[in-house]
Image (tube, rainbow, N blue to C red):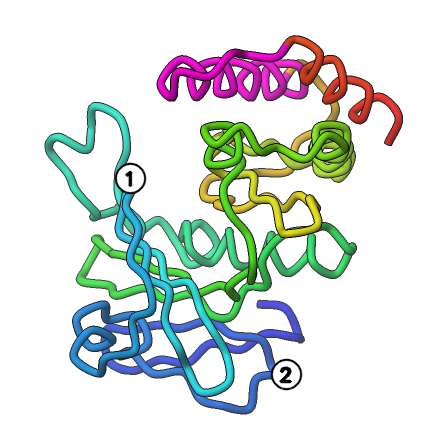
């Protein structure tokens, strides 16, 4: 454990927060039903797993429960095998976001991570700060409202993340957000990892290209080759 973080244990619940947070985390922070009962849920979204946007005092948080993806999700919904605290998905994502935020990258601020452990099995959650006035890039594409200079900025942002050695395994138009000024942010770093320079960078860009094409196909918009040229230019010129 790093000197700037602390673990709080409450029975089977283990919570990770930064030492700068004076408020002691509670297991109820990670209980979606508890937030609903308190009427603090501002928005619920869907995807692989449940995501709640909740109000906590003067802060607005995003609560995400970790769920399985792919074929394994048909048999195992949200349970993971405990192989040590350093390998917990929520803790790894929380720590990576802390590092990237410290380096000035446009990612959400990690508030707290949580594990509920039962023997060799655990479930996990993470709370990050809400990025105000942002929408998914996929929404802007569907609306035909992507700001003209945002494509190059998206490319530069992806390049900066790659320059920090981070391989984002779900680099899609749904995980890139734009704010009102067209500034891009990258979210959902579950299973992201630091890697030495290699082929993964090209594969990440190809994954993003496929995502843009898929969104265009699904929303009936036209894929813009000039936009991809701008993304590549931003990536190269970072």
Query: Within the magenta stretch, is there residue 219?
Result: yes
Residue named by callout 1: 48
Q: Horizontal and vertical percent for residue 37?
A: 16, 79
Q: Quadrant of residue 110?
A: bottom right
Element marked by disc 2? loop
User: Which residue: 45% across, 87% down?
Assistant: 57
- Is 189 on the left or on the right of 33, as rendered? right
Q: Horizontal and vertical percent for residue 85?
A: 42, 59
Q: Residue furthest top?
A: 225
Which span of residues is magenta-colored?
200-224
Residue named by callout 2: 20
Q: Nearer the viewer, residue 118 or 35?
A: 35
User: Which residue: 51% across, 44% down?
Assistant: 189
Q: Nearer the viewer, residue 151 or 162?
A: 151
Please name which of the two marks, 2 or 1, marks the residue nearer to the observer: 1
Is 41 rendered above or below residue 178? Answer: below
Is 83 rendered above or below residue 110? Answer: above
């Amino acid at each position: 454990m790093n000197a700037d973080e602390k673990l709080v244990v409450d029975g089977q619940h283990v919570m990770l927060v930064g030492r700068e947070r004076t408020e002691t985390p509670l297991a109820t922070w990670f209980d979606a039903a508890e937030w609903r009962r308190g009427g603090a849920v501002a928005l619920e979204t869907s995807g692989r797993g449940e995501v709640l946007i909740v109000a906590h005092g003067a802060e607005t948080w995003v609560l995400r429960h970790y769920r399985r993806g792919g074929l394994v999700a048909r048999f195992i919904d949200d349970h993971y095998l405990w192989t040590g605290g350093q390998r917990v998905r929520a803790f790894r994502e929380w720590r990576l976001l802390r590092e990237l935020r410290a380096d000035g990258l446009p990612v959400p601020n990690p508030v707290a991570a949580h594990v509920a452990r039962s023997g060799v099995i655990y479930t996990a959650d993470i709370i990050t700060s809400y990025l105000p006035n942002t929408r998914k890039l996929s929404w802007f594409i569907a609306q035909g409202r992507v700001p003209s200079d945002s494509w190059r900025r998206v490319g530069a942002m992806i390049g900066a993340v790659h320059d920090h050695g981070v391989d984002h395994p779900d680099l899609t138009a749904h995980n890139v957000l734009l704010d009102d000024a067209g500034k891009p942010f990258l979210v959902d770093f579950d299973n992201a990892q630091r890697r030495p320079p290699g082929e993964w960078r090209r594969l990440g860009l190809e994954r993003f290209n496929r995502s843009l094409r898929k969104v265009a196909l699904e929303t009936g918009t036209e894929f813009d080759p000039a936009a991809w040229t701008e993304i590549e230019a931003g990536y190269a010129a970072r």
